[in-house]
Image (cartoon, rainbow, N blue to C red):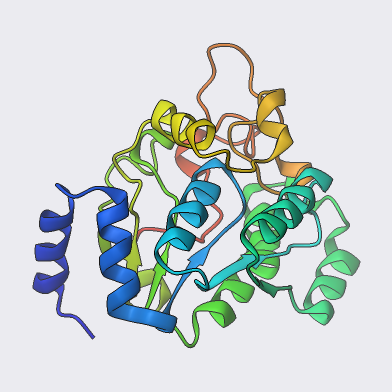
Amino acid sequence: MYRAEEVERYAVEFEKKSAQEMLDWVLSTYGDRIALASSFGAEDVVLIDMMVKINPRPRIFTLDTGRLPYETYDVMERIREKYKIEMEVFFPDAKSVEEMLREHGPNLFYKSTELRKLCCEVRKIRPLERALADLEAWLCGLRREQSVTRTEIKKVEVDVAHNSIIKINPLADWTEKQVWDYIKANDVPYNALHDQNYPSIGCAPCTRAVKPGEDIRAGRWWWETPEKKECGLHHRVA
């Protein structure tokens, strides 16, 4: 396990490197002990395209919450077909979901922030813990300009919230334009909801299209204030 000062040194060093250079290093360093957590948003499909060009069989996992939009499954299938890759799919525990719905109903997330976080805990956080169990590091498509909760992310971090494994954010300094320029230049499959003003896509009941002038993550949990708009997957511990 890396010491905090080592991770900080890597963060400074990689801040000056391209996403491709970072991926080349982390994939060769960690091998099958690193994986990309993909929800098949624009940033994730960019990373998949980059990874496959370095290693044709990278590890990629996704969390199927049971409430995803049809369009997410569609792009998942198109990614599988284009790159000939397998993906690890993690589902929530059925008994936990059944108990949660029995007590709070199917749309509990609209009732309070606490119940929304409970739903995220059951459907996303616990499956993520299983996905990370055999990894030393994980890759994410987080960008600093995405939201007020992500402005301070580094390209290399210690993920204290998830057993202090290494978290790599190769696109941390990318703009939205860079993401879409890459997708178009490399003919990368992407979620059709992006063409319907959905810049950020999560579960179907918790995602809506954004309106002109709104923040790119305004459509996620739109009934909550911006500083609360994280599900816990990317919780930063002070």
Q: Which of 28 and 223 is in front in this view?
A: 28
Q: Which of 145 and 25 is in front in this view?
A: 25
The picture places residue 214, in percent across and down from the top left corner, at: 54, 18
Residue 37, compared with residue 223, is above or below; it is: below
Left or right, residue 82 beside residue 22: right
The picture places residue 88, in percent across and down from the top left corner, at: 65, 75
Q: Which residue is drawn at 25% across and 61% down?
A: 156
Q: Which image quarter is the N terminus in?
A: bottom left
Residue at the limit of the structure toward the top, as seen here: 212
Q: Which of 85 and 101 is in front in this view?
A: 85
Left or right, residue 113 beside residue 12: right
Residue 175, compared with residue 153, is above or below; it is: above
- How many marks are shown on the rendered structure? 0
Give the quarter of the image for residue 98: bottom right
Give the quarter of the image for residue 200: top right
Residue 147 in view in this figure: no
Q: Which image quarter is the C terminus in?
A: bottom left
Q: Which residue is drawn at 39% across and 43% down?
A: 149
The picture places residue 236, in percent across and down from the top left corner, at: 36, 58
Residue 157, compared with residue 57, is above or below; it is: above
Left or right, residue 139 beside residue 61: left
Give the quarter of the image for residue 104: bottom right
Q: Which of 112 and 189 is in front in this view?
A: 189
Q: Residue at x 50, y 68 (%)?
A: 56
Left or right, residue 18 beside residue 198: left
Q: Residue at x 32, y 45 (%)?
A: 172
The picture places residue 99, in percent across and down from the top left corner, at: 84, 74
Residue 233 in view in this figure: yes
